[in-house]
Amino acid sequence: MKPRTLLQGLAGLAAWGCLSGLALVRLWAVLYGRVPGPAILAAAAALAALVVGAAWRLRLVSRLLLPFGPTWRTALLAGAAFFLGALLDTSYGLFSAGDMAIGRLPFRLACALGSGLVLAGVVLALATAARRFGRLELPRGRWLLLLALAVNVLTALYAAGSATVYYWDSNIYWSSSTMLAGQSLDLAQVRLVLQSVITQEYNYLLSWPISLVMRVLGTGRYVYLFAIANLYVLPALAGMAALARRVRHGGVLLACATPMLLYTGLTGFVDVAAAGVGIWAFVIYTDQERPQSARGILTGALLTLVFLLRRYFFFFTVSFGLASLAALAVRRSQWKSFAAMAASGVVCSLFFGQSFLVEQVLRSNYFDTYSAYDQGRWVDAVMLCRYFGWVLMAAALVCVVWCLLRRPAARYTALLTLAQPVLCLLLFTRVQSHGQQHLLLYLPALCAALALGLEALPARRPVRAGAWALALCMLGSSLLPRPQPASPQEIGSLAPLPTFTYAPPQRSDLAQLVALRVYVDGLSAQEPKTAAVIASSFVFNSSIFDNTLRSAGIPQPEGPKTAVATFATVDKRDGFSWAALECDYLIVADPIQYHLGEENQHLVTVLAQPVLEGTGIGTAYRRLDVSFPLQDGVTVYVYERTRDIAPEEYRAISAELTALYPEYAAQYHSPV
């Protein structure tokens, strides 16, 4: 036997052993308890053998994994990726090994080596694809510099003029970024960030880069918005410039036509980063002048990254894949790009996103659990028009249809651009209605459609001037100061132009919220006390209460602080928060506050109503002689618990909620 053949055989055997260890742990996390352990081991070994055999048969190493040829640079890149993959492997975070044999050192070592091998393969494949794709020439010039300057000026003006409270999604990443900035920057923190992808809905992938900026500039709101604008918004704007690179100043025009991108970032949503990745997926996949395999591999990785950053962008990933398949109807010659995208997406999704795919996609009854968030199709239409304007969406539709009918060379891209947002809308609305951040799902396709239209426009100045007039109308409408609705249900018509405003938000009752927070903390002056907020609306909720001082720029006092217990508020998604019944105080708003409607938030009603009326379980509480009037006619009261809650009162709450949702009885089971 030739030495080279022997070495290849030994390398294949070593790869099979490493991949068997990784496959065993990954399959164990999914199948243990359903399939016997020996069967899982056999399946892992067979799967690893299949992968190694396919790689040898298809000559994947020479075709996909040698970005710099058989040189030291390729070896160095592979070694670095292998080392990081083995060192930072999070596979054992998918389940609890306990005292099982699979948790012992040999299995952990094999799994880590397998993880390193897979990461090395992914990195080499992406590097090879990137080199074959080639350099993408982006527009340069003063216009883009002025655009970046305008983004930072708007960010500074918005942050400086804001006087409001940041809560829920607009605060979550600010808080997690601040938390990471306060920790030691070491390997343990990197592992914490990677583990969060497995364990948390709002993982730390987007918080960590912001935390690095905060270590230098501080943890204030302006620094947070500054980081979002420069780390996440500007790359998305660069993607717009790449989409419209064949049109003079096309990127600036797209940026002006879609002001909701920066606005969404300024309201605190790091989701703009995922939208930027989606834009780049369109840029790469629709560039038909590049090698198909390279386009597909890079796009598949981007489609995985997009939902790792924000879970709901999985709808974007699925709809993009289905739309790409549909687009083959007009250009079958592009099948290689689709096949490469599918293969790359599957490998990256299983390796990096297994926990999400298994727990949230396959096992979760997502449609029913989040049914409370389905506010009807009118709300969806209102939100789309509020942030995009129906004039712009109609213009994008005209662009796509025109290209389908009159520009044969653009039909493939046009069909993809048309099908993706339609499929995404159909899939997403099966689960819930759109919030502000969810509209970013449609921004990449909207920009791609407008870019197609710009390329199709005649070069005559009057025609180009019309496109600029439309874009500037969109931008100008968003700059006009106007009253903003408290919820989408208050909007009665479909807006032709965006109706949000860059005018910094102001809360007229900010002083009352500060006074409420200081008063509740003062209740612990003599001894530690606990409280729970029984309200859930855009005017008042527990997140607003928690973040009032920080949002107002007021340092947290050094004195006593009343501990606030978590109180769940959404039916089906949440169980009842029994710990609230042990709190010393309840903070209740009158009228009772909901953000999804009374019919979807009985968890709030079942406690707030008797407390306000002084009936049933409410007889255990005494209203203190203080009140805090907030905006929109809402008044907040503080109630002190005067006795223990009786076991029958626990069971009464359980019975009421179980009668409403018998299939969720386990969530509402009384602890006493």
Image (cartoon, rainbow, N blue to C red):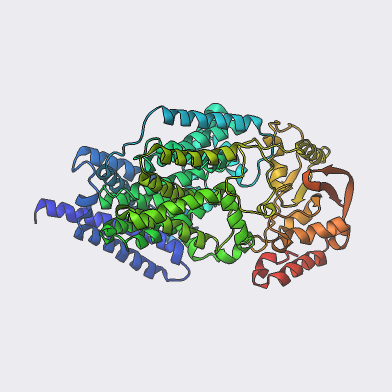
Q: Is residue 301 above or below residue 39?
A: above
Number of numbered callouts drawn: 0
Residue positioned 47% across, 46% down in the render:
275
Q: Which residue occupies the foreground of this view, 470 or 147? A: 470
Could you tell me if residue 595 is visible in this image?
yes
Q: Is residue 649 above or below residue 642?
A: below
Residue positioned 22% across, 46% down in the render:
66
Q: Which residue occupies the foreground of this view, 320 or 270? A: 320
Q: Quadrant of residue 608?
A: bottom right
Q: Which residue occupies the foreground of this view, 64 or 666? A: 64
Q: Is residue 545 left or right of residue 439?
A: right
Q: Is residue 182 above or below residue 85?
A: above
Residue positioned 57% across, 37% down in the render:
476
Q: Position of residue 133 (x, y in %)?
A: 27, 44
Could you tell me if residue 347 is visible in this image?
no
Q: Position of residue 655 (x, y in %)?
A: 75, 70
Q: Residue furthest right?
A: 625
Q: Quadrant of residue 266?
A: top right
Identify the image quadrant of the N terminus.
bottom left
Q: Is residue 289 left or right of residue 276?
A: left
Q: Position of residue 262 (x, y in %)?
A: 53, 39
Q: Position of residue 33 (x, y in %)?
A: 48, 69
Identify the image quadrant of the C terminus.
bottom right
Q: Residue furthest left?
A: 2
Q: Which residue occupies the foreground of this view, 132 or 653? A: 132
Residue positioned 75% across, 37% down in the render:
510
Q: Is residue 448 left or right of residue 500?
A: left
